[in-house]
Every structure is written in C-alpha cells, then in structure tokens.
Image (tube, grey):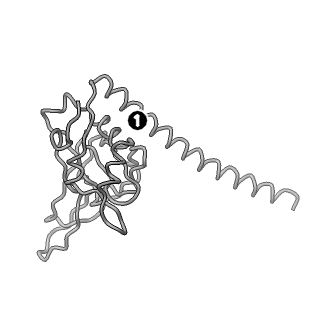
C-alpha cells in the first residue's frame, strides 16, 4: 500500500531562534544539530549540546518514536528518537515527523526513517529540493512524499536492517579513528627508538 506522508503523519519545522523584544528568563534545552545525525540514521546523543534560549521561545518537543529528517544541505538523512529526552528539540535544519496515533499500530517509526533514506525517497527529495546555495526540502514537499507501507513484519525487518547498517557504519568510523591513533603512536615510538 502506498500513502502520502501527510495521510499518516504530521510534519513540523525544527526550532527557529527568534530574538524577542520582551525580556524573559533563560531556559536550557538540548538541540539536535545536523552533525548529530549520520547518513545511516544514527543519532549521536552524546554530541548533543544544551543551548540557552528564551523561556518565551516555542519549539517542537521531541518524543520517542519521532522521526527527524535532515531537510537542509546535501546530507539528507532520517533517524528515530529512540529514548526519552528531557527538554529537547531539533534545529531548523530538520523537519520533525510524528506518526499519528491512529497509524502507530500500522507504521513503525524505524521503518519510516529507513524508507526516507532509500533511493526512491532520495530521488524525490532531489527533484523537489529548492535553494541554490543550500538546498532544502520544504515541509510541504515532505508531506507529499509517497511512502510504501508493507506488512508490519516486513517493516520490522527493514527497520532492524537499517539499524544494523547504522551501527556498522559507526563501528567502522570508530575503528578508523582508533587505527589513526595506533599508527600515530607507533610512528612516534619508532622515531624515539635509537635516539
């Protein structure tokens, strides 16, 4: 079954900082930035920083099961908020997709994020992206995305596959960093030998 995204989910923009003329108490919230989501949909929660905002500012609060979509820039990806976050949101580089209650038993967030990272969706995003310097996919365009909704068991398998791919990507990245440190230390040790 194919459906438009706006038939099964609500889409809203991430937090946009506004300079208020009214003075207000500062408030600290965690804001997921573009660098915190990799191309395989893994969110690096350890990298998310708290920022001070005005207590008058409005922002979309994140909940487990929300799908975040990196809509601005050339590195498009989608990931799932997989834990409870206290006072957290996404930057304005993201669009937040929240599956409606009446579809939560038919559409898995992990599958939706996986689908949004696949070639048919990426081709659609390339076609509808606007902006000459920094391309972006608008909320209106994202709402029009046609999503293939298979049976729940297939969704689960595809979501798990997507998660495994993301974990493998992260492990490869960390292994690469460890190799660099190892090689650097080995060279330094060899340079010191015989002095």
The foreground one among 165 and 183 is 165
**Residue 67 position by quadrant:** top left
Residue at figure coordinates x 42%, y 48% from the top left? 39
Image coordinates of residue 142 in percent, x first then y, are 24, 50
Q: Compared with residue 99, is residue 70 higher up or lower down, i.e. above or below?
A: below
Residue at figure coordinates x 35%, y 54% from the top left? 126
Image coordinates of residue 176 in percent, x first then y, are 60, 47
Give the structural element (helix, strand or loop) at label 1.
helix
Residue at figure coordinates x 54%, y 47% from the top left? 173
Q: How many marks?
A: 1
Q: Compared with residue 56, is residue 79 higher up or lower down, i.e. above or below?
A: above
Image coordinates of residue 161 in percent, x first then y, are 42, 31
**Residue 137 position by quadrant:** bottom left
Residue position marked by numbered label 1 in the rendering: 162
Spot the residue most to the front.
127
Quarter of the figure with the N terminus: top left
Q: Compared with residue 141, is residue 167 higher up or lower down, i.e. above or below?
A: above
Image coordinates of residue 14 in percent, x first then y, are 24, 57
The foreground one among 188 and 90 is 90
Q: Is residue 38 left or right of residue 109?
A: right
């Amino acid at each position: 079954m194919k459906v438009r995204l706006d038939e099964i989910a609500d889409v809203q923009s991430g937090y946009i900082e506004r300079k208020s003329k009214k003075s207000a108490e500062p408030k600290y919230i965690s804001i997921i930035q573009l660098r915190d989501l990799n191309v395989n949909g893994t969110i690096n929660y350890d990298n998310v920083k708290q920022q001070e905002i005005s207590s008058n500012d409005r922002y979309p609060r994140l909940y487990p099961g929300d799908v975040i979509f990196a809509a601005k820039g050339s590195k498009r990806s989608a990931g799932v908020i997989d834990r409870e976050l206290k006072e957290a949101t996404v930057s304005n580089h993201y669009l937040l997709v929240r599956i409606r209650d009446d579809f939560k038993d038919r559409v898995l967030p992990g599958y939706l994020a996986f689908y949004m990272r696949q070639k048919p969706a990426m081709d659609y995003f390339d076609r509808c992206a606007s902006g000459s310097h920094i391309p972006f996919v608008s909320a209106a365009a994202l709402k029009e995305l046609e999503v293939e909704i298979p049976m729940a068991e297939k969704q689960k398998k595809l979501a798990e596959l997507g998660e495994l791919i993301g974990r493998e990507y992260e492990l490869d990245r960390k292994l690469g960093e460890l190799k660099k440190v190892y090689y650097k230390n080995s060279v330094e040790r060899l340079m010191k030998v015989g002095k």
